[in-house]
Image (tube, rainbow, N blue to C red):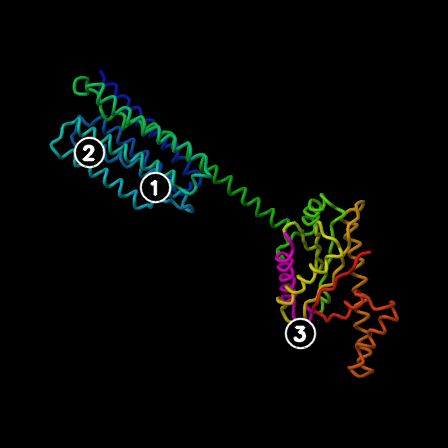
Amino acid sequence: MLQLQSTSLLVAASASLVIASAAAAAIGVRQKQRRGVWWWIAANLGLAGALAAHALEDQNEFLAPLAAVLALQWPVVTLVGMRRFFARGASTLPPWADALVLGSSLLGVLAGWYLPWSAAVQSQVLVGAMLTATVYAALALWRLEDFATTPTLHGLLVALVGSALVQAAWWAIASFLLVPEATGLDLALGAWLAPAAVALLMPQLALVMSNERNVAQLRASHRKLRHMVEVDPLTRLPNRRHFHELAAKAIQPSQELTTVLVFDVDRLKHINEVLGHQIGDEALKQIGTVLRETLRRRDVAGRLGGDEFAAVLPRTRVADVEAVITRINTRIDDRQVAPRIARVFLNVGATQMLASETLADALRRAEIKLETERDKRREAEALADRMADSMPASEVMPALAEALATRRGPLSTSAGLDLIPIGEVVPANAH
């Protein structure tokens, strides 16, 4: 009666595995299956064959070793499928250890069939080999790099550990509390059915893990698309819309302690005409790199469009902005794309935000400062050119300083900055 019941259980489990594996294979044919899934399906079909062979081994003596081989492959082949599914991750247990464990288990079990051992001892060897392979598969699964980030692997680990515990408990109960020879009890039954129960979960786990991978790829694609929408591809700075979003958050804690800067590239059109748009684009790219490397983490910089850039510096007074501009200036001089032909030069407007104004208003005030200082600088350059044509070189700078003092009053720090050669960054003081 017990033998009939164990045979029925084995046949039922085998049929269930075949049906589940066939369903998984049908889904794989209709959809693109990921690496490793077919290994799980093959392992399940092999285990189904092992169950059927073990149920019928009384009819043919060669079915017993065949059943052992087909059963012992399941934990290791399933592990190989996991390694392939998570191929990008590493593991502390090398793949060659899988072949070593499987080969030694198979050799031990097959040797038991050809040595003069009793059927009980042969069954105990089979149980020990299956238990060893299951514990190894659980350990290797735990050591996968993706284990910490994939909840499904946690569930599979629990299932494998549970299978090992059931196998050990069945072996202990059958060996010490029952008498297999007297009752006709199948001593290795636990070594067959416990893995089969886990194997029945594999098609569902495969679908869950494939879905997790699809969701992860969709999220990565969403992040990539968001990056493309929010970041200027040339300078890798936030575009106008994203800059306003980030800047609005950055200035919230202390708006009145925030300095707003607006930059533009002086005579970028001339650079494009003389050297070509490729060099002009490279100059813009270098400016983006300088701003990313120079500003602090809490500062926000962005490209407003064309050759115009902006930055907000929280907890920074406009009186202290000259040090920031000096750092930017130094980095730009180190990255000149054509220093002897057309040096990159930034016009800068700086202003302190007011507690009652919006960011757009502050940017507009900074733009006005930029335009004003840019016009003054160009007037000074034109005046210097006219003077250079009509007097000795040694008298140009004193005369230019006197002219500036006559036009604007005594020579101030702001007026002195107008005399900086092209290639430097010129700050505009806020009122």
Q: Earlier in the sequence, mark 3 or mark 2?
A: 2
Q: Which mark is residue 65?
A: 2
Q: Which amino acid type is marked by label 2? A: Pro
Circle 3/circle 2 CB separation < 8 Å: no
Q: Residue at x 62, y 66 (%)?
A: 278
Above or below, comparing residue 195 to residue 183 in the picture: below
Q: Quadrant of the C terminus?
A: bottom right
> In terms of depth relative to the viewer, which is nearer, 171 or 227?
171
Instruction: Please tell me whether mark 3 or mark 2 is closer to you in this view.
Output: 3
Say which quarter of the image contains residue 111: top left
The image shows residue 386 at horizontal and vertical percentages of 82, 78
Say which quarter of the image contains residue 28: top left
Which residue range is magenta in the image?
A: 271-296
SS class, disc 3: loop
The residue that label 3 is drawn on is 341
> In terms of depth relative to the viewer, which is nearer, 270 or 166?
166
Considering every residue shown, the one lying at the far bottom of the view is: 392
Q: Quadrant of the N terminus?
A: top left
Considering every residue shown, the one lying at the far top of the view is: 1
> In terms of depth relative to the viewer, which is nearer, 157 or 420?
420
SS class, disc 2: helix
Q: Residue at x 67, y 48 (%)?
A: 242
